[in-house]
Amino acid sequence: MPNDASLAPPWRIGVDVGGTFTDLVLADATGAVRVFKVPSTPADPAQGVLDAIERAAERMELGGPAALLERCELFLHGSTVATNTALEHKGAKAGLLTTAGFRDSLEIRRGIRENPWDHRPPNPPVLVPRHLRRPVRGRIDASGAEIEPLALEDVEAAAELFRSMDVRSVGICFINSFAAPAHEQAAAALLEKLLPDAWISVSSAIAPVVGEYERSSTTALNAAVAPRTVGYLRRLEQRLRDLGLRKHMLLIQNNGGAASVEQVASKPVTLLLSGPAAGVGALTSYSRAIGSDDLISMEIGGTSCDAMLMAGGQVAVTDEFQVAGYHLALPSIDIHTIGAGGGTIAGVDGAGLMYAGPAGAGAVPGPAAYGIGGTEPTVTDAQLVLGRLRPGPYAGGSVTLHRDRAREAMERVLATPLGIDVESAAAGIIRLVEQNLLHAVQRISIERGHDPRRFVLVACGGAGPMHGASVGRLLGCAKVYIPRLSGAFCAIGMLHSNVRHDLVRVTFAPLDDADPDQLDRRFAEMEADARDMLAADGFDEAASGFARALDLRYRGQQWDVRVPLDDGRFHADRVRAAFEAEHERLFGHHQPGGHIEITKLRLAAIGRLPPLRPAAAPAATGAPEPLERRPVWIDAATGWREVAVYAGSGLRAGHRLPGPLIVEEETTTLMIGTGDTIEVDAAGNYVVHLPAPETAP
């Protein structure tokens, strides 16, 4: 493989800012890919981006960031600023205009608890306090007709209050604005004149859907995160342009597609899942090498695990998800996230039981083994104590692992209080975390009506390959796929992500009475708007694609089921059959001949970027030699065993080895268990074949 200095321009760059590390992935004109990893800077995420660029330019012997960025044809970024702003409750002071009579819908919520048996956890703090939620007279009915004119004097009074209270951002959410946005638009126009320095968020432009609370929550959260998020993105893009970047920076949205900074400036809430959503591009790319489009990804970093499922080549998109306990109604990749990563902290609770997570050590102070201030034992410390990780430089030399520090923390916090040895404490952490990982994957598969045994588990992220084989066995999977560069999974996904815009139009109609020509005209109107958006992105007709879908439900049902229109045309009998099949999969039943109604028209507009062709992987020329053999704790059944440790750089396409063994890669470490077999495929990635459940150890 070529060295870093031989990479050929122009290149694509993807940067993913994680809780512990910032990953920069560069793909050159020949398809060669390199990963550059630096510690994240939580107080200033942009610094991590710039540090990664500096590291890449240095390794490539380019003389500085300018030479790197000037030759970049595509720069994509997964931003965590919106997410962190919500999680840390550091949003801007915001106001909210609501329809008179609906002032408290944001605080009342839906009255639904995730766990109906647990009434203790309080709801998160309301996004906008009551004195800043201002009622405005005026009313639109559900059909879009005005039944009471908008009282602009109420808007003026609210603006005066906001000015006196130093409100920096204002959301507008009026009842039924999804059907007719005129009142919201008039209020926004007036506020822009009265409060020229304030951010204005309009619900009909952000989330034009039925559901007053969800729309209010989405708009309020957008108002809270907008100043900090958009300010950061604009400053970062300007710094990159000043350094030599000639193209606009693109951002990964919740829907897995990319968009420019200015396109998301009015609705930065679409960036709340920016990093994890990039996994769609990575899964799509790897599916070709795997030879299957039924995949489950388990991406584990330093802080969290993101689980995602691809069935039949499609990753599910949902309209309802939560961040920090706040509900959002936006098209988003269906991702389930838990607090389980390399930095997950373990301890002993008040009942004398060991726990692991959800809190994490992050980049600073990090695991105890880092020696930079962390004092609590983490998953990384446990892997080091169990011999699975090697002491010394780690993550490309970004940090150094100290086994003595890991053992000290493990003994002080876990082993001594529990009356067990350090190794048993470390093994306990691994077993607890892997049980949590199992539940996360089951949540995204079994609870969605999918049998995980027919899927290939893709173990990725810096920590995923340490747990992939174990979790795959628990799930009953036949094999686990581990990308060679799995530590930069999301950043790689960015390089394979297309530009995407999602359009939604609320439309109520009985399925059997729907007029195909009328629906086609409405879709055509949406496509015309989408073409303009893609044209502004620089895509011509040949590079533009559109996917139509319908949301449907049985009469009286609260939740919708989405059905794609595969050929773009509406056929009631085909839609009914597809709806009933999907309803059966999701809920275990359907109503033959039931009354089905259409609730929404959906359009996904795709701007197709030129495909990235990976370079061919070198083939094996002989049996690989291990770097060393060392004692490693394998699992509860096997215990400790001396195993071979291989350098990933020495494993080529065609190599096949029986476990147990360890493979040390540039961005991750692979733990292969007893009875497993690992091989390197033609793409240069790893396939772990697991024993059948009845013969598993």
Image: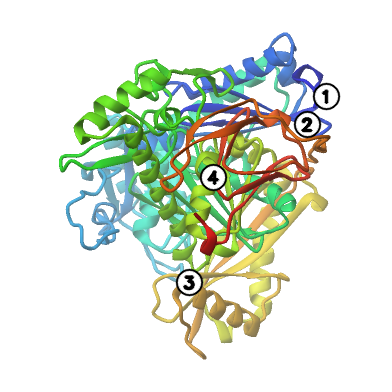
Closer to viewer: mark 1 or mark 2: 2
Q: Which residue is mark 2?
A: 32
Q: Which residue is mark 4?
A: 673
Residue 8 is tagged as 1
Instruction: Work out whether mark 1 precedes mark 4 in sequence or the reverse, and give the earlier one.
Output: 1
| Mark 4: amino acid | Gly
Would you place residue 68 above or below residue 339 in this image? above
**Residue shown at 57% from the left, 86% from the top:** 513
The reply, left or right, for residue 631 in relation to residue 149 is: right
Work out which quarter of the rendered image holds the N terminus and state it. top right
Instruction: Work out whether mark 1 precedes mark 2 in sequence or the reverse, and give the earlier one.
Output: 1
Instruction: Work out whether mark 4 precedes mark 2 in sequence or the reverse, and give the earlier one.
Output: 2
Residues at circles 1 and 3 in contact by the CB criterion of under 8 Å:
no
Closer to viewer: mark 2 or mark 3: 2
- The location of residue 622, given as percent across then percent down, is 81, 35
Instruction: Work out whether mark 3 precedes mark 4 in sequence or the reverse, and give the earlier one.
Output: 3
Closer to viewer: mark 1 or mark 4: 4
The reply, left or right, for residue 209 in relation to residue 406 is: right
Task: Please tell me whether mark 2 sits on a helix, a strand or a loop.
Answer: loop
Q: CA distance from mark 3 to mark 4?
A: 34 Å
Q: CA distance from mark 1 to mark 3?
A: 48 Å
- The location of residue 428, given as percent across then percent down, is 34, 41
Residues at circles 3 and 4 in contact by the CB criterion of under 8 Å:
no
Q: CA distance from mark 4 to mark 2?
A: 31 Å
Q: Which residue is mark 3?
A: 586
**Residue shown at 79% from the left, 50% from the top:** 543
